Amino acid sequence: MSKPAPALYWVRRDLRLSDNAALRAAAEGGRPVIPVFIRDSLAEGLGTAPQWRLGLGLGHFAEALDGKGLRLVLRSGDPVDCLQALVRETGAEAVHWTRAYDPDSVARDKAVKAALEAQGITAQSHTGHLMFQPWTVETRTGGYYKVYTPFWKAVRGLAVNDPLPVPATLKAPASWPDSEKLDDWRLGAGMRRGARVVRPYVRLGERAAQSRLGAFMASKVADYGRARDAVAEDGTSCLSENLSLGEITPAQCWHAGRRAMEEGKAGAETFLKELVWREFAYHLMWHSPRLLTGNWREDWDAFPWNEDARLREVRAWKQGRTGVPFVDAAMREMYVTGRMHNRARMIVASYLTKHLMCHWKIGLEWFEDCLIDWDPASNALGWQWSAGSGPDAAPYFRVFNPETQAEKFDSEGRYRDRWIAEGRRTATETALSYFDAIPESWPISARDDYPEPIVGVKEGREKALAAYQGRDF
């Protein structure tokens, strides 16, 4: 009997061995598996921090594959050209990958599928990045959900597939195709000195993600309903970093959360709702790609937001020098850790779009460049929700007051002390790390005086409400 032809496993945002339907399909029937990652225009277009984190993730996943006797083949270029070349070089008869949902990836994948199938090559996408496929969840009238709570009610009782185990056997091909070198791609070059600061906060790879999930379920989930908003506490799962690159799946998190709920742990349902909020973001992006690029509510198109990212106020917001401690602490947390507490994200987004009257796209693009847990759907929905222009958005008249928010969620000032050095007699190590992480071109020192507010909290709120007055939102 002739040996089965190899299959290509096209690696994307699924850097794991377990619960990986694409990998299992490629290995089915004892076929040799050739994992390949393609640095295409979408990968090259990632922001600075997401691209750096991708490079770390790829390096770690390559080691995991090596432990199973496989190699991660690296190629650059158009995926159609790269995959067709690999089919010719290896004799592969199938290509499998995990499905993506943003419009650019969908267009790319359709082109790949059409080109391969025209050659008689099996080309198949698989689930894994979401629990519920966007086209399978509909309202009673057949449309898509535009409000979160009905969406949650529609999916909370649906079956979620049990996570798949690591394939028992992964066979290597008789010979490996040529591969580019990850170091030559210099995916982390844009981080410069910031990489050294952020790296200790990264929890890299599938094993670390599973450890994070286990620790959260064991000791934190019971109090999650309260602790998730307490910005100075370690009360969240921090799994967004790993979910963004598929080092863990939402299904794995869902089943762990369900078990915790059955055990009577009070915060487990809230955790499940947060997982479904992520699904809701993808549901909206799939059905209304406008979410990524323009006001989801078109009546906001005429709103007089500032769109000039060069303004002094925008620069101060980016640098964490607005003079509003809660806002500045949150921005600095992002530069040091690569992430930002979710409660803090709402505050800094509201401050930019309402107190400073700046377009949400300025913030969306800045987060896209700075977050190691960047996710296209969640980032867009978060910004449009805060700005008031999106689906299920905060009402336009809701202008978060950073001072009252700090009193409520950082009453002892520990979060602000952790991240702000100026004006403190003894600054914390984390606060000082901010000055090591930021671009050297920013003329900022821990010895500087802390700035006065660029816009007063009361003044900014009144200005925003005056701009909203008389508009039909």
Image (cartoon, rainbow, N blue to C red):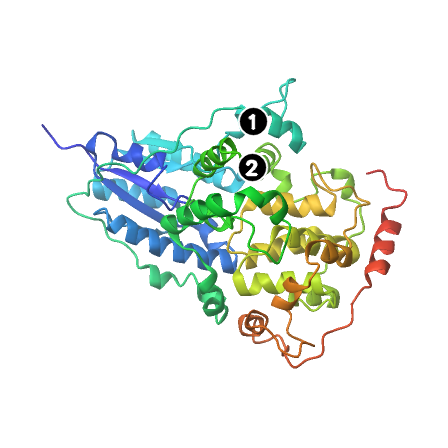
Residue 189: image location, x then y, percent: 45, 66
Residue 27: image location, x then y, percent: 25, 35
Horizontal side of residue 3 vs 41, given as left or right: left
Horizontal side of residue 239 vs 7, given as left or right: right
Q: Which residue matches tag 1?
A: 155
Picture layout, residue 457 above or below residue 35: below
How many numbered marks does the figure carry? Answer: 2
The quadrant of the picture occupied by the N terminus is: top left
Circle number at residue 96: none
Q: Nearer the viewer, residue 431 or 51?
A: 431
**Amino acid type at image mark 2:** Tyr
Q: Which residue matches tag 2?
A: 282
Using the numbered discs, state the Cα–Cα distance from disc 1 to disc 2 in whole angstroms. 14 Å
Question: Could you tell me if residue 162 is visible in this image?
Answer: yes
Spot the residue most to the left: 1
Spot the residue most to the top: 141
Mark 1: which secondary structure? helix
Horizontal side of residue 406 vs 441, given as left or right: right
Residue 193: image location, x then y, percent: 48, 72
